[in-house]
Image (cartoon, rainbow, N blue to C red):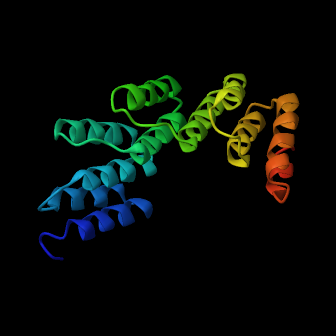
């Protein structure tokens, strides 16, 4: 590969991360002759995508120490991984930092990650309240994330109400009905 073709290196790091090879992504990252902010972002995403939370957070810290800033997508990756690990308080803190420390905007994807994380942690009421108060129009995706949590935590009453919301937004989704079986 061309020594100074950072775009190609970044593409390889991302590809290996997407295919479940975070360690290979990290190895390639260490070999890049010229790193840029995207190099760091794809490394963080590779770790996060593969559930390597401590490595993702450490890479995020190193990125900041290197004087480079994460973007909104980098935060989505880390917040999602924090949510899957049940660390919703850390996920919330990270989103607050994203807005107040980095001046970035929250997107619907950030809310979906938080709803999913709250739901996985058994905080289904809080997740539903977050949907009701988010500054975006609701989507079937956010309701399906909450529906999955209702199923996991056998919250049938809320699950029926949430399924109606998901069906209202995507009536062609047969998967929504199958999630109603507790």
Asked if residue 50 can be seen in this view, the reply is no
Asked if residue 167 is positioned above or below residue 135 in the image, the reply reads below
Q: How many marks?
A: 0
Q: Position of residue 129 (x, y in %)?
A: 70, 24
Q: Residue at x 81, y 57 (%)?
A: 173
- Location of residue 58 (image quadrant): top left
For the N terminus, the quadrant is: bottom left
Would residue 40 be found to the left or right of residue 46 on screen?
left
Please tell me which residue lies in front, 82 or 154.
82
Q: Residue at x 43, y 61 (%)?
A: 18
Would residue 31 be found to the left or right of residue 100 on screen?
left
Q: Position of residue 33 (x, y in %)?
A: 11, 62
Q: Residue at x 38, y 66 (%)?
A: 15
Q: Position of residue 144 (x, y in %)?
A: 73, 44
Q: Residue at x 29, y 39 (%)?
A: 60
For the C terminus, the quadrant is: top right
Asked if residue 67 can be seen in this view, the reply is yes
- Location of residue 135 (image quadrant): top right
Asked if residue 107 is positioned above or below residue 2 in the image, the reply reads above
- Location of residue 155 (image quadrant): top right
Q: Position of residue 40 (x, y in %)?
A: 27, 50
Would residue 168 be found to the left or right of residue 44 on screen?
right
């Amino acid at each position: 590969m061309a020594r100074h073709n950072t775009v190609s290196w970044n593409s390889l790091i991302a590809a290996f991360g997407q295919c479940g090879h975070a360690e290979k992504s990290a190895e390639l990252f260490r070999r890049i002759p010229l790193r840029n902010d995207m190099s760091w972002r794809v490394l963080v995403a590779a770790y996060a995508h593969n559930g390597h939370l401590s490595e993702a957070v450490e890479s995020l810290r190193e990125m900041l120490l290197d004087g480079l800033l994460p973007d909104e997508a980098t935060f989505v990756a880390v917040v999602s991984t924090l949510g899957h690990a049940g660390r919703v308080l850390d996920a919330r803190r990270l989103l607050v930092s994203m807005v107040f420390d980095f001046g970035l905007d929250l997107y619907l994807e950030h809310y979906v990650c938080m709803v999913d994380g709250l739901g996985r942690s058994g905080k289904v009421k809080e997740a539903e309240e977050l949907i009701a108060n988010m500054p975006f129009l609701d989507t079937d995706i956010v309701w399906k994330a909450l529906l999955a949590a209702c199923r996991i935590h056998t919250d049938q009453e809320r699950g029926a109400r949430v399924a109606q919301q998901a069906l209202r937004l995507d009536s062609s989704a047969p998967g929504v009905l199958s999630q109603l079986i507790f």
